[in-house]
Image: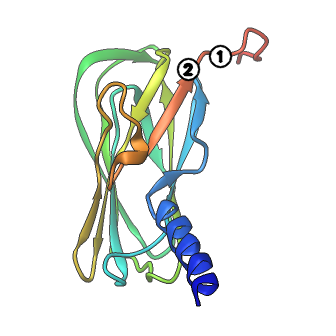
Amino acid sequence: MKKLLLPLFLFACANAAQAHVTLEQAKAKAGSYHKLTFKIGHGCEGSTTHTVKISLPEAATGAKPMLKPGWKIDTQSLALSKPYQSHGKTITQDVREVVWSEGQLPDAYYDEFSIQVKLSNAVGKLYFKVTQLCEKGRLDWIEIPAEGQSGKALKAPAPMLEVIAPDSEAPHH
């Protein structure tokens, strides 16, 4: 009996580790255009997810969410603490939140929600707070590790993108 319980325990732990909202590509080059693809792996308390809300840090600009059949998209723009230049224009307000709603993601399935952004030239970690609203309850993936703390210790970590220095050989456009 003990031999049967250990594999089941390890399987449950592995599934719990993958249960968080994650980014498909967890690294990107500073100053690049990047497609953020958030993977939602389950619902809340076994129920269907009907709304996914993603908050964007200011280092991710010019957000353009991808349409999803069966889902409504709303964006919220807010004033920026530091304006930026884009195509000869000074941008003082930008999309800070994207919400997909009125959809159906049953607990037994996973789905992906994508947003194209332009990353700033700063190197470091960017965190994206995500909220799932479901038929039964909600999940807030908003925890950000303290300096020097591992994100593995958090119960509801916000997805993290590591922004790295661009290669000196990278093509420019």
- Residue density around tag 2, few if under 14, some if 14–19, many if 20 or more, within 10 Å: many
User: Is residue 158 visible in the rendered structure shown here?
Assistant: no
- Label 1: which residue? 166
Vertically, is 170 above or below 143?
Answer: above
Give residue 58's position: percent from left, percent from top. Answer: 33, 28
Looking at the image, is 95 positioned above or below residue 82?
A: below
Tell me if 76 is positioned left or right of 86 in this view. left
The disc placed on residue 95 is none
Give the spatial CA distance, label 1 vs label 2: 6 Å
Looking at the rendered structure, the kind of residue marked 2 is Ala
| Residue 14 image offset from top left, x and y in percent | 56, 65
In front of the other: 167 or 119: 167
Q: Secondary structure at mark 2?
A: loop
Left or right of 170, for residue 138:
left
Residue type highlighted by circle 1:
Pro
The C terminus sits in image quarter: top right
**Residue 167 sits in which quadrant?**
top right
Q: Kindly identify the residue that appears in the image at 49 percent across and 26 percent down.
A: 119
**Place of residue 107 in the rendered image (x, y in percent of width and height, measured from the top left):** 44, 81
Image-based side of 103 in relation to 31, left or right: left
Tell me the colour scheme of the image. rainbow
Q: Which residue is mark 2?
A: 30
Residue 29 percent across, percent down from the top left = 61, 24
Q: Secondary structure at mark 1?
A: loop
> Which residue is located at x 41 percent, y 80 percent?
104
